[in-house]
Image (tube, grey):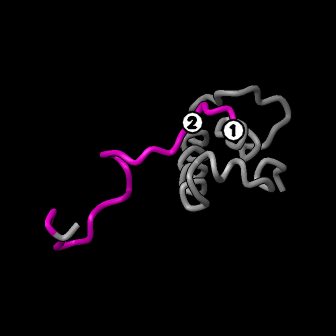
Amino acid sequence: MIEALKDDTIIKKVGGRFKLTALMQKRWVELMQGSRPLVDTASKTELDIIAEEIIGEKITAEIGEDSAVTPEAGSTDDDI
């Protein structure tokens, strides 16, 4: 297991376990599609690279217009 994931620091940095998981999954897909790592990759696994990018604040979890979080179907702004 990756040492960085054993400590709660990375979870607190991102804002929770769910956000951490979503961010790691999204970044992993980006790396598999050819994105360049933002840290040194010398003999590191993809998870090690992603964890180091998060700890080094090279990538962050931001909820924005392009996120997967959408309102429930049939809800209006008044419901929120």
| SS for dot 2 | loop
The magenta stretch spans which residues? 55-78
> Identity of the amino acid at label 2?
Ile
Instruction: Answer few, some or many: residues within 10 Å of disc 2's Cα (few below 14, many 20 plus, some between 14 and 19).
Output: some
Determine the residue positioned at 37% across, 50% down: 67
Q: Which is in the foreground here, disc 1 or disc 2?
A: 1
Q: Quadrant of residue 58?
A: top right
Determine the residue positioned at 54% across, 55% down: 19
Q: The N terminus is located in which quarter?
A: bottom right
Q: Please determine whether, in this image, residue 41 is positioned above or below residue 7.
A: above
Residue that mark 1 sits on:
55
Percent position of residue 43, x then y: 85, 34
Q: Quadrant of residue 72?
A: bottom left
| The stretch drawn in magenta includes residue 40 | no
| SS for dot 1 | helix
Percent position of residue 74, x then y: 16, 73
Determine the residue positioned at 80% across, 56% down: 6
Instruction: Answer few, some or many: residues within 10 Å of disc 1's Cα (few below 14, many 20 plus, some between 14 and 19).
Output: some
Residue nearest the viewer, comparing 58 with 46: 58
Q: Please determine whether, in this image, residue 41 is positioned above or below residue 67.
A: above
Q: Please determine whether, in this image, residue 9 is positioned above or below residue 39.
A: below
Residue that mark 2 sits on:
59
> Identity of the amino acid at label 1?
Ile
Q: Is residue 55 found left or right of 32 in the rendered image?
A: right
Percent position of residue 46, x then y: 72, 43
Residue nearest the viewer, comparing 24 with 57: 57
